[in-house]
């Protein structure tokens, strides 16, 4: 059988994609559970810095191999792609290790601690011709894809404003990871990445960034407001918080109408299109709203097509979001150890 341009054969494309899971925390568990629902996915290995943690995770999900180091997973020839689920302070090291070993990578959001680390990973992946994608599941969600299609087709005219928020009341514990600067703690990287990514999905990288925040004693942001501006006249008013629950809604307004996402804008079950002079039109989507299967399916499609980047979650877009997050941190005075 003759390999195609990507170096795969028809039989390779037909068999389930073999996943390795790097880390054993809550997000790793959620993603693994979603993979186990997919007929074209197999979870074949898991890795942790602790042999016992990897073994416990493997036993929980009937995963054949448990590795007590990240390097062992990166070297596992039976793994087609690695999902990096460490705290984001370790994304650069973990994803880089896998890319160096030639393993395609799906890396959780935020992609890295800062734009410099993100640029290093992207440069490494491109130099080696290895697939790399940020796990921005919002971009792969059918409702968000439909919303984006409507906006780009001119359903609401030229965008003038975007509004989005994401906040919840986290435990007020100074030892919690969200309060730890060494782990990239704070509202912005954990939650604010969603409103920023939503605005930039529709408008691209902003020309101006303004921000204000309430900081903790540890030096991370607890509550942050952002105002992004574009030379074309559009603005985005965004917020994030780990001190208060917010509606987690989004709205996109244009010269000919508006789209409202009433709840959970980054994984919505519905949204409403308001065209000027017309009755509101609701778009509803069935199935589980909080599944990560859509991003896993996009990785599978891209790898089978021999692509090294996803058009749904392009690396240049990921870099642009990281630059905006850096700009926000510069304005609110948040720096992480080592920066």
Image: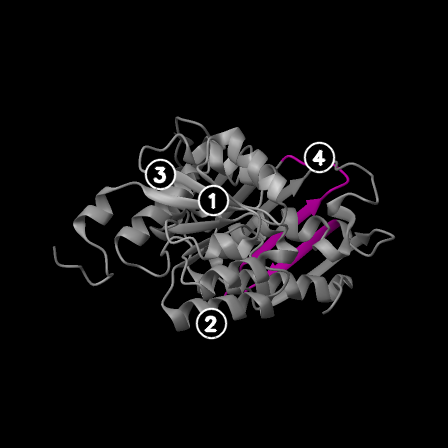
What separation in Å lies between label 3 and label 2 (alpha carbons)? 28 Å
Q: Which quadrant would residue 126 be assigned to in this image?
A: bottom left
SS category of the residue bearing label 1: helix
The mark that comes first in sequence, 3 or 4, is 3
Compared with 33, 259 (above or below) is below
The mark that comes first in sequence, 3 or 2, is 3
* Residue of label 2: 123
Any mark on residue 328, and which? none
Compared with 28, 5 (above or below) is below
Q: Nearer the viewer, residue 261 or 111?
A: 111
- Residue at 64% in and 48% down: 190
The answer to whether the residues at label 3 and label 1 have Cβ atoms under 8 Å apart is no
- Residue at 27% in and 58% down: 306
Mark 2 or 4, closer to the camera: 2
Mark 1 or 2, closer to the camera: 2
The mark that comes first in sequence, 2 or 4, is 2
- Residue at 52% in and 62% down: 97
* Residue of label 4: 245
- Residue 311 position, x and y percent, is 36, 56
The answer to whether the residues at label 2 and label 4 have Cβ atoms under 8 Å apart is no
- Residue at 18% in and 60% down: 4
Which range of residues does the magenta coloring cover? Answer: 223-247
Q: Is residue 158 left or right of residue 16?
A: right
What separation in Å lies between label 2 and label 4 (alpha carbons)? 38 Å
Q: Residues within 10 Å of mark 3 (few under 14, many from 20)?
A: many
Residue 80 is one of the magenta-drawn residues: no
The mark that comes first in sequence, 3 or 1, is 3
Mark 4 or 1, closer to the camera: 1
The mark that comes first in sequence, 1 or 2, is 2
Q: Which quadrant would residue 17 be assigned to in this image?
A: top left
SS category of the residue bearing label 4: loop
């Amino acid at each position: 059988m003759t390999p195609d341009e990507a170096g795969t054969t028809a039989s390779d494309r037909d068999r389930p994609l073999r996943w390795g899971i790097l880390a054993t925390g809550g997000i790793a568990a959620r993603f693994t559970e979603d993979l186990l629902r997919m007929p074209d996915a197999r979870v074949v290995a898991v890795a942790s810095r602790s042999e016992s943690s990897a073994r416990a995770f493997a036993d929980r999900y009937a995963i054949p191999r448990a590795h007590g180091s990240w390097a062992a997973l990166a070297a596992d020839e039976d793994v087609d792609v690695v999902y990096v689920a460490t705290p984001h302070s370790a994304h650069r090291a973990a994803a880089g290790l896998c890319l160096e070993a030639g393993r395609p990578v799906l890396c959780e959001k935020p992609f890295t601690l800062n734009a410099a680390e993100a640029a290093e990973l992207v440069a490494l992946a491109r130099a080696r011709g290895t697939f790399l994608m940020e796990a921005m599941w919002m971009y792969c969600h059918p409702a968000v894809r439909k919303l984006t299609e409507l906006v780009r087709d001119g359903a609401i005219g030229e965008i003038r404003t975007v509004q989005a928020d994401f906040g919840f009341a986290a435990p007020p514990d100074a030892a919690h990871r969200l309060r730890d600067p060494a782990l990239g703690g704070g509202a912005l990287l954990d939650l604010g990445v969603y409103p920023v990514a939503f605005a930039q999905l529709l408008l691209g990288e902003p020309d101006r960034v303004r921000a204000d925040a309430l900081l903790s004693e540890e030096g991370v942001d607890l509550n942050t407001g952002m105002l992004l501006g574009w030379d074309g006249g559009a603005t985005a008013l965004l917020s994030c918080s780990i001190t208060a629950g917010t509606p987690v809604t989004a709205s996109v307004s244009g010269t000919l109408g508006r789209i409202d996402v009433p709840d959970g804008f980054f994984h919505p079950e519905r949204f409403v299109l308001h065209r000027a002079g017309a009755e509101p039109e609701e778009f509803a989507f069935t199935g589980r709203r909080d599944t990560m299967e859509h991003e896993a399916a996009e990785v599978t499609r891209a790898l089978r097509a021999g692509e090294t980047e996803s058009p749904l979650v392009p690396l240049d877009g990921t870099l642009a979001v990281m630059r905006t997050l850096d700009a926000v941190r510069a304005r609110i005075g948040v720096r992480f150890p080592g920066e």
